[in-house]
Amino acid sequence: MPSPHDPVAFYLGSLGIRWYAIFILTGIILAIVLIRWLAAKRGFDTEFLLDIAVWVVIFAIIGARAYYVLLKPIYFFHHPLDAFDTRLGGMTIHGAIVAGALTVWWLCRRHGQPLLPWLDMIVPGVALGQAIGRWGNWANQEAFGTPSTLPWAVHIAPDHRPAEYIQYPTFHPTFLYESLIDLATAIVLVWLVLRLPKSRWLRDGDVAWVYFIIYGVARFFIERIRTDSLYIGPLPAAYWLSFALVIIGVTMLTIRRTLWTSLPAHAAPAPLSPRADSAVPSEAGQ
């Protein structure tokens, strides 16, 4: 698999538009389209989704970048302005998940929307966005694995190779592995979201917990062959967050069927509100 010779797709005047940004933006747009379609299918307020989408995306991007910066404190201490430059990548999906989930929780609470059904409808879009966004790593020649001679191994230019592997031309395309897993996950989650209202064994929130488990397990195994892992203590940071996602997913699936049974299995959609009333944030909230 060849890699792009230039991470810049085209120029608008002197401004270079990078493939990384194009893939990320495409993933975000298609994620919103999918979530809106699921919300309409389930009878939820699609205008609420459109109102909160920009805030969720903004805080998810901030969280993704902030977590990456925190994992490289020495570098960014000496180069503080680089913390605001995302043109070459440097965002973590774990940070985006945490910040995005907290933003959804706050906005649902503020506007009287049921949190768990919205999380269920959002995670298929997240998985789809990840599947597309991972190709930004391909464009930047980053997030690849150990050397490989497999037919689908990706060619990495010498200036992008780790020093210990400088003599190897091709590597495991871990971004491709994760992209395919994310796409398959999105398909499964969409099926679960559509099936959930009629199911006797599915509960609100189950789709989100299933996503946590699948992604946590998949990322753990993919991280084992990546060459650019950032560490927290003795283990890659992705290990710790993957462990946390799996634990949360398994725990919540269990609790929803044992201790936390006071909530109905399937919450009804909140009443549809006029467009003006659902704006986020409202002028009164400033």
Image (cartoon, helix red, strand yellow):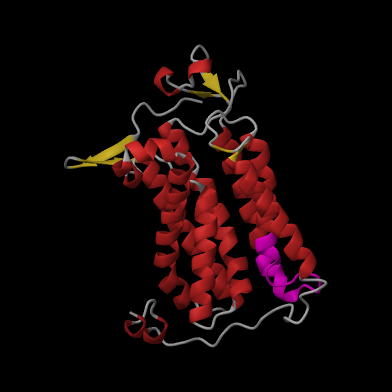
Give the residue drawn at x 62%, y 48%: 241
**Residue 64 place in picture, x, y as percent:** 46, 51
Horizontally, residue 220 falls left or right of residue 200, namely left
Q: Is residue 67 above or below residue 169?
A: below
Q: Is residue 195 magenta?
A: yes
Horizontally, residue 284 falls left or right of residue 172, namely left
**Residue 59 place in picture, x, y as percent:** 43, 60
In the rendered image, is residue 36 in sight? no
Horizontally, residue 60 falls left or right of residue 222, namely left
Q: Is residue 206 magenta?
A: yes
**Residue 12 place in picture, x, y as percent:** 20, 44
Q: What span is colored magenta in the figure?
A: 192-209
Give whichever of 102, 44 is nearer the camera: 102
Q: How many marks?
A: 0
In the rendered image, is residue 54 in sight? yes
Give whichever of 263, 268 is nearer the camera: 263
